């Protein structure tokens, strides 16, 4: 079989992989649940390729992510739920429905007006999905779905924190100024210091969680994706620590043979070198 740019060939390949008796044993035994971890991993790898600005890897990782969609759609088709065409039709319909300023009226909206319109349409879609007349057990009023209940639990912690905060903020539960969040971060830092005195792991963990949650909130309010920020910080740490390893190796030393003071000094050199390069760029 020769590779093709036609999406139909990819669907045919997946069908062949899943075909009983003649397909791949590993592919045949997969389920919706077993594939999810791979889907999440591939999404991260797409983000990594973007962060590295590596277009060849980016193309490959997008393909791997597309495979996850095709794989799940094939399993759904075998179960009689829906097929890949239904997935395409559903997202096409959603895009048209949520962009009346492009595919209908009104026209000439500002970015803020577009975001407001998008939120209104999403809220209408969500309301339409609610079963009509559904009641709480033992109550006379319609059931209420918690506002934050549709934020996926499987999201990375910082990403989920930002999404929870955005939803709560949309309902009015929001600091008026980002500086108020900064004050909250200082307060959480003070509480963490107090927790360290207690030496109780569970208390310390809770305070660290509160501090991370507050940091995610500040990033969100400043239009910075907290997950992207921590990935970049991780890359920076990896790069600078690699500099320490390289210099020590040049001196004929292993990491275990260097003192913390020596490594810290090299860390500062790595930082200064990066800052110098950034100024020249």
Image (tube, rainbow, N blue to C red):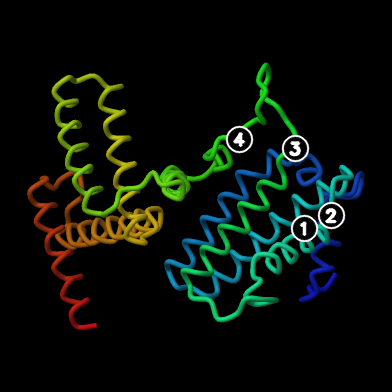
Which SS class for mark 1? helix
Q: Provide the residue designation for mark 1.
A: 87
Mark nearest the camera among 2 and 3 is 3
| Quadrant including the N terminus | bottom right
Mark nearest the camera among 3 and 1 is 3
Please tell me how crowded label 3 is: few (under 14), some (14-19), or many (20+) other residues with Cα within 10 Å. few
**What is the distance, in whole Å, between disc 2 and disc 3 at their CAs?**
25 Å
**What is the distance, in whole Å, between disc 3 and disc 1 at their CAs?**
23 Å
Q: Position of residue 122 (x, y in %)?
A: 62, 55
**What is the distance, in whole Å, between disc 2 and disc 4 at their CAs?**
29 Å
Sequence-first tag of 3 and 1: 1
Within the image, what quadrant is residue 259 found in? top left
The residue closer to the viewer here, 223 or 99, is: 99
Which SS class for mark 3? loop
Which SS class for mark 4? loop
Residue at coordinates 70% horizontally, 76% vertically from top-left? Answer: 104
Assess whether mark 2 and mark 1 are in contact (beta carbons under 8 angstroms).
yes
**What is the distance, in whole Å, between disc 1 and disc 2 at their CAs?**
7 Å
Sequence-first tag of 4 and 3: 3
Q: Provide the residue designation for mark 3.
A: 131
Please tell me how crowded label 4 is: few (under 14), some (14-19), or many (20+) other residues with Cα within 10 Å. few
| Quadrant including the C terminus | bottom left
């Amino acid at each position: 079989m020769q590779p093709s740019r036609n999406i139909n060939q990819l669907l045919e390949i997946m069908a062949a992989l899943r075909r009983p008796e003649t397909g791949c044993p590993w592919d045949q035994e997969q389920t919706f649940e077993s594939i999810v971890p791979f889907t999440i991993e591939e999404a991260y790898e797409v983000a990594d390729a973007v962060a590295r600005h590596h277009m060849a890897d980016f193309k490959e990782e997008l393909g791997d992510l597309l495979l996850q969609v095709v794989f799940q759609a094939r399993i759904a088709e075998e179960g009689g739920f829906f097929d890949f065409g239904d997935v395409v039709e559903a997202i096409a319909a959603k895009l048209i429905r949520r962009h009346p300023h492009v595919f209908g009226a009104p026209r000439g909206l500002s970015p803020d007006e577009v975001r407001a319109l998008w939120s209104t349409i999403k809220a209408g879609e969500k309301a339409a999905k609610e079963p009509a007349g559904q009641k709480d057990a033992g109550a006379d009023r319609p059931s209420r779905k918690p506002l934050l209940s549709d934020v996926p639990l499987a999201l990375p912690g910082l990403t989920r924190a930002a999404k929870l905060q955005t939803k709560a903020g949309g309902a009015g539960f929001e600091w008026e100024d980002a500086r108020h969040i900064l004050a909250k971060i200082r307060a959480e830092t003070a509480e963490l210091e107090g927790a360290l005195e207690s030496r109780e792991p569970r208390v310390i963990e809770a305070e660290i969680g509160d501090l991370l949650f507050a940091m995610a909130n500040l990033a969100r309010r400043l239009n910075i994706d907290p997950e992207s920020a921590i990935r970049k910080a991780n890359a920076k740490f990896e790069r600078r620590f690699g500099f320490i390893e390289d210099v020590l190796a040049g001196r004929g030393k292993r990491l275990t043979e260097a003192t913390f003071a020596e490594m810290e000094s090299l860390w500062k050199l790595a930082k200064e070198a990066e800052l110098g390069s950034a100024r020249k760029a």
